[in-house]
Image: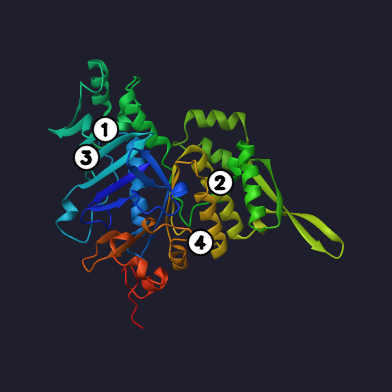
Amino acid sequence: MIQEIKIKNFLSFKEEVTFSFEATKDTFAEDYQVVEVAKGVRLLRFAMIYGANASGKSNLLEVFDFMHHFWFYKPDDMDEETGTIPFKLDKITTNKPSSFELIFYVNSTKYWYQLELDDKQVYTEKLFYYKSVQPTLLFHRELMDGQSVINFNPTAVKVSSIVKEKISVECLKNMSFFAARDKVNASIPEIDTAKDWLKNQIYPVVTPRSIMFRFAEEQMMENKDIKSYLLNFVRAADFNIVDINTQIEKKEIPQKVVDYFMNNPETTEQEKEKLKKDRFVSTPKTSFMHTVSNERGEEIYSLPENLQSEGTKRIFGLEAAIYNAIQDNCFLFIDEVETSLHPQLLRFVLLNFLRKESSRSQLLITTHYDPLLNDIDEIFRKDSVWFTEKTKSGHTDVYSLTDFKGLNRLSSIQKAYNYRKFGAYPEIDL
């Protein structure tokens, strides 16, 4: 589980900001919203971020997407950019490196990761773990004379000189240690436990533009349990959908398309051989079985995907992602979660996630839907609410609802937000 992340000089984050999942001493809903990952360490399973448009909400999610891509992307050469984007509204920060720190738990073991880089190279990269109250260094990677130099802590990690040399050779100055480590066949369990968690347990960000239904289709074809879960969900949510059928259709690729790829110099020989052997493309075709009541009684009709609402298709995709996150104890991000969803359905989605008591999954959402603030201390915890606010100098501040005093004296958190008591609200001149 993720405890906290620190960001500096990346996108709209000029100064260092900290976002944390660490729970306060509040006992509300702690049975299913708080996980004690280690003695005295209580982490939240859920958090939501409010803020005006262009305040940096989505950028906070983008941080995780960037880091996950950077950790495991293998550039072809040293000329490729790392992908980091410094704060652009200041002539000083434009030429400074970005920095990140991530504290996370794998089971009950705490890890602390540090990264500093610009668009051309990594300056420092470190990983620590905690076997006591003090951190133990696992590896330290730094830039010396334009080359990456990697050192392992010999008291904590057993790495042969041959493996160390292979990883050092593979680790270009514009790639992560983890990407280089993946290219070398060796066992480094102290590091690999953290690396594998970062690779497998952090999902890509779901945005309003994400084509989530295709994801749901693939999952339903691969896993009957997911199909059963989704059907139970839409029945409970009153969609009048009683079944879903997905079939694979094979269509022949037109000769003109085949000729184009066969004569294209960028088509590999392997791809050409595949085209020669198989001239068909497989596409899923899904239909929904709807039940209706009329003068003849109850009848069932089949409707294709293209006749379903955007909300119906989105909910299937969101719930498929949530199901996987819960089952695999993963970290899921959803940007503008309310997109195409009725307010009551949105609450149902979030409650459905939160009720999974035994899961170590975490969900981080951004939203403009402020009525959820009225559900504080009824559904959501105070420490699960965060805000982003853009300052006059253009950079993003990040802060928690619990930074404010006197919350228990407020009759309505939503009204207080709309009266600008917490900031993070659009200032519109009419």
Q: Residue at x 31, y 32 (%)?
A: 178
Q: Position of residue 136 (x, y in %)?
A: 22, 30
Which quarter of the figure is the C terminus placed in? bottom left
Q: Are marks 4 and 3 in contact (CB under 8 Å)?
A: no
**Element class at badge 2:** helix
Seen from the viewer's position, the closer of residues 58 and 284 is 58
Neighbor class of circle 2 (other Cα within 10 Å; few <14, some 14-19, many 20+) is many
Q: In terms of sequence position, does the residue under pointer 3 or pointer 1 come before the other?
A: 3
Measured Cα–Cα span from mark 3 to mark 1: 28 Å
Which residue was labeled with disc 4? 339
Q: Residues within 10 Å of mark 3 (few under 14, many from 20)?
A: many
**Position in image of residue 104 (x %, y %):** 33, 40
Give the mark nearest the N terminus, 3 or 2.
Answer: 3
Q: Is residue 292 left or right of residue 198?
A: right
Residue with the mark numbered 3: 121
- Residue 360 locus on image (x, y percent): 44, 41
Q: How many marks?
A: 4
Residue type at numbered disc 3: Gln
Q: Secondary structure at mark 1?
A: strand
SS label for mark 3: loop
